[in-house]
Amino acid sequence: MRRSLATASAVCLMAVTACEGSPSGSEDPPETAEEVAERGLVGIALLHRGYEGGDPEKDQVLVFHDPETGQPLHELDLPDGAVDPMAPDLPVHAQFSEDWRFFAYATDEPSAITVAALTGPGEDGAAAEEGGDAAPAYEPVESVGAAAGEVLSHPVVHGDRLWYVSTDEQAARPPQVMSVPLDAPGGAPEQEGTLVLGEQRRPSDWALTPDGALHVRDSVPTRRVPGAGGPVLVVRETGGSVVNASMNTGEGLWLTFNDAPVWGGGTAVLGPDPDSAQPAAGAYLVTVDGQSHTSARLLEDSGGPVVQYTPSPGRDALLLQTGQAWYRVDLEEGGVAGTEELFPRFHDASMDGYPLVVRWSQEAPEADPGASPSG
């Protein structure tokens, strides 16, 4: 542990307000600290593995891009190797706190879940406080250590708690979903649920709803929901939210994105089956209303499948990426109100060749007192 979470919490707030926009190749002057403090960290937050052609293991950067132009606005370095540089479809949206102050990631040898705080470039954050040139970065501050024979993985930050999976390789029990307070991750964890083992003893996928309810996919029965003269939607729901959904059309199978946030309520976004030899273009926005559902086709003429997306906080718009570009789709009463191509997709040095979307941050959320470590 490099410093207590109490110290890191205070320092990271100063770091956010001191973060200056310094987009590579930009002709615009950098923003002042006061402007950044007023605007907060806003934009399309993308996690680049190998930023600007760098080492995908070491040059991992959280970049906030202007949602209209794609211009980089803020760049925050992550700890080396915090995210697997070669793994596709990682749910990185779940690893950052809502106010961006904390980032949780899994490490090996020894196995642990590490909490990093957004701090200034020095141990005491002095450079950030004084408006130094070095940008703020996420620095490790505390870890949840594994017991003998235990492996910790899949960290999720939700509200004031840190969730993760505990697998005991020496025991016959299935993996357990655990949680600890974010401000005291070294305390005794609470067991939240058990992951069902499927074929070849693969643990079930799991997710948290916006209200913090645990959804273990293979423990939830499916429900068939017909559409108005269209295909049947098959859903799994927890706490009033559709978490998993699938739909067969004449173009093939459409599925929810396992690496995307749960929309909440009866709505979900479906993309073409990634295992399809020729995946269809675009995506579907589906909404369950009682015993029926409606669906809206998105980006049917985009020329390729949607590979990732992020909704606006108010769920009144979507940003979607195909293999070629980013698009904005405005929504109104569950339907498409407008579609606009924004800018070409970005590149990084990961296996997929593009950065992972974290969140569309439109305004700086107020700090949650319950998530502020008090020491």
Image (cartoon, grey):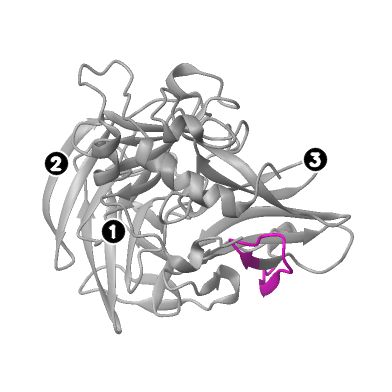
Q: For residue 66, which quarter of the picture?
A: top left
Residue at horizontal 66 percent and vertical 60 percent from the top: 185
Residue shown at the point (47%, 29%) measured from the top left: 127
Q: Which of marks 1 and 2 is nearer the N terminus?
A: 1
Q: What stretch is highlighted in magenta?
A: 179-196
Query: What residue is disc 3 on?
Result: 109
Q: Residue 131, percent across and down?
A: 38, 29
Residue flagged by tag 2: what amino acid is it? Glu
Disc 1 versus disc 3: distance between alpha carbons?
A: 37 Å
In this rendering, position of residue 195 left or right of residue 260: right
Magenta stretch holds residue 180 = yes
Helix, strand or loop at disc 3?
Answer: loop
Query: Which of pointers 1 and 3 lies earlier in the amino acid sequence?
Result: 3
Q: Mark 1 to mark 2: distance in Å?
A: 19 Å
Q: How many labels does the image show?
A: 3
Rendered image: mark on residue 313: 1
Nearest to the observer: residue 131 or residue 289: 131
What residue is drawn where x is 19% and y is 35%? 342
